[in-house]
Amino acid sequence: MITIKNPEKYSAGLYTRLSNEKIEAGNSEVLIENEDERESGSISTQKAFLNSFCRENNIKVFDTYVDDGVSGATFDRPDFNRLIRDIEKKKVNLVLVKDLSRFGRLSSKISYYLEEFFIEKGVRFIAISDDIDTGHIETSEEMVQFKAFFNEWYVRDTSRKVRNGKRIRAKEGKVMTTYPTYGYKKDPKDCNHYIVDMETAPIVQEIFELAKSGKTATQIANMMTVKKVLLPSEIIGNNHTRNMEIKRGWNRNTVNRILQNVTYLGWVSNGNTKKVNYKSKKTMVMPKENRIVVKNMHTPIIDLETFEIVQSMLEMRRGVRTKTYDWLLKGVMYCRECGKKMSLVPQRRSDGRTLFYFRCNTYASNPSFHLCTPHSSNLEKTTTNVLQMIRAKCKQVLEEETFMKIAQNKEALDLKNEIIISEKKIVEINKKIDELYGSKFKGMFDDDDFQRIYNNLKKERNENETRVENLKKRLGKQESTDEIKKVIKNFYNCKEVTRIDLISLVDKIEITEDKKISIHYKYNLLNQILTDGLEEDVS
């Protein structure tokens, strides 16, 4: 039985949550509602339950926080975040939930909030139905962990059932995308079935015919942009996937996605992406052989012969590009003006030689729209200048090595002494906390005094732990200087620089339209030791 002493000192935040998770059942369209969610009751039931508890205990309610239709597998919820902000502002010092599963279903997050965050902020947490109250020492941490583990297991089990249900529907050839594929729209009678969109299907057919005639994806994209054809994202409604600040029009990636999509053959492809796990929102693209493809599910827009010809042409272009463009600065050269990577283009001269030049990818995607400038720079000349700049930086670091070692040795000794002092303080604080718990059990402190003293000790311990962590990071940087210098010395002495040598030192290289180079190194030692000469003309 949970009792509240001194209710007048509390300002309560009532938190309610209900998931809308449903599970696909077998081969039919029957949906089984989440049994646990039904048991926990609706949002209105939770509110009534919590408000009744507050009235019975004379607790003042600051606000009610509602996350309706949000899974307990995530703690990134709109009203939960609002509750945390109000706690940070000291508007709420008591959090009430009906049961622990309403608070969340990830044991690691529950442990963090109940055992660290709420204690540090002086917040009391109560899960009424589970008889969990962090304001009483009698609350069993083992029981909290057990209930949290069980709640998380339920999410894991539900996730497995949902995956199995989706896999069954995928094998039946059901369309399970939120937005329809460009060229189609969802059947009003069956949202899991496609019908041809008579307005956009001809555009898809035109793109395939252009590709079949030998046009590249970039050329097709430029033609679509000039004709002011609406982008797929502007038609099917998923504008959230695009950067709306700069409307770049069609690009080769958009065209390539259309040209490689088997949906236009009348096939349904499911399982194209997969979540890393039920705890994460991140997804990964699945290999083609692992996807579930069902043929003859809707009216095709493209015939199989045309599709296969286009795939062969795309594959041939990929093969040529991979073999031809391989260079030392590949992947680290960027345009200073727009931030895009630089690509390489060949230029055949009248004497038979082929020279290579850098080109900005933003400019290359749509040259006629002048979104950026070419940034044309000779590959050989730029590479030579970059290597000279890096060697000059390495040389200066090595020349100052003797002086730096003297300073570092003294600083390292001071850091170690400070770490020892702070670690001793942590040991002493832990002893005081142990003694405090003993005194509490003997009845020498009431709840308020115990919590006040404990919070002060916990705060002091956290400050010292943070200090030790920061000191060790600084010490680690000092002690790793020798390793950094080995890398620098290896680069400086090597006769022929490889990509491994370059990447070990360089994070990014930027080049401006007037051919000024800026090199950003992976180590602060290189970035800070020399402030002059970071930019050099390579025209």
Image: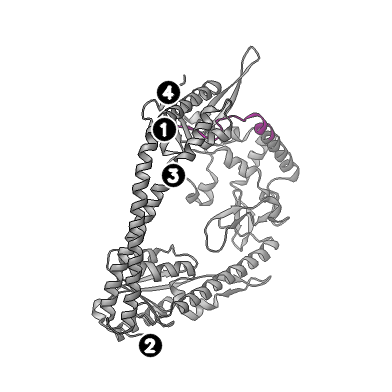
Q: Can residue 418 be seen at all in this image of the molecule? A: yes
Res. 405 image quadrant:
top left
Badge number at residue 12:
none
Label whose residue precedes the other's in the sequence (2 or 3): 2
Q: State how far apart marks 2 and 1 are (Cα).
A: 68 Å
Label 2 or label 1, whichever comes before in sequence order = 2
Label located before the other in sequence (1 or 3): 1
**Residue positioned most to the left:** 8
User: Label 3, label 4: how many angstroms apart (C-alpha)?
Assistant: 33 Å
User: Tag 4: residue type?
Assistant: Glu
Q: Amino acid at mark 3?
A: Glu
How many residues crowd mark 2 within 10 Å: few (<14), some (14–19), many (20+)? few
* Mark 4 crowdedness (10 Å alpha carbons): few <14, some 14-19, many ≥20: some
Question: Dot 1 corresponds to which residue?
Answer: 401
The residue pinned by badge 2 equals 1
Give percent across and percent down for residue 356. Answer: 58, 23
Color theme of the render:
one colour
Between the residue at mark 1 and the residue at mark 3, the CA separation in whole angstroms equals 14 Å
Q: CA distance from mark 4 to mark 2?
A: 75 Å
Of helix, strand and loop, which one carries label 2? loop
Nearer the camera: disc 3 or disc 4: 3
Q: Is residue 324 magenta?
A: yes
Work out whether residue 237 or residue 480 is closer to the camera in this orientation and state it: 480
Q: Which residue is mark 3?
A: 479
Q: CA distance from mark 1 to mark 4?
A: 25 Å
Q: Is residue 437 above or below residue 341?
A: below
Q: Which residues are magenta?
A: 319-337
Q: Residues within 10 Å of mark 3 (few under 14, many from 20)?
A: some
Identify the mark at residue 536; answer none if there is no mark. 4
Amino acid at pointer 2: Met
Mark closer to the observer (1, 4):
1
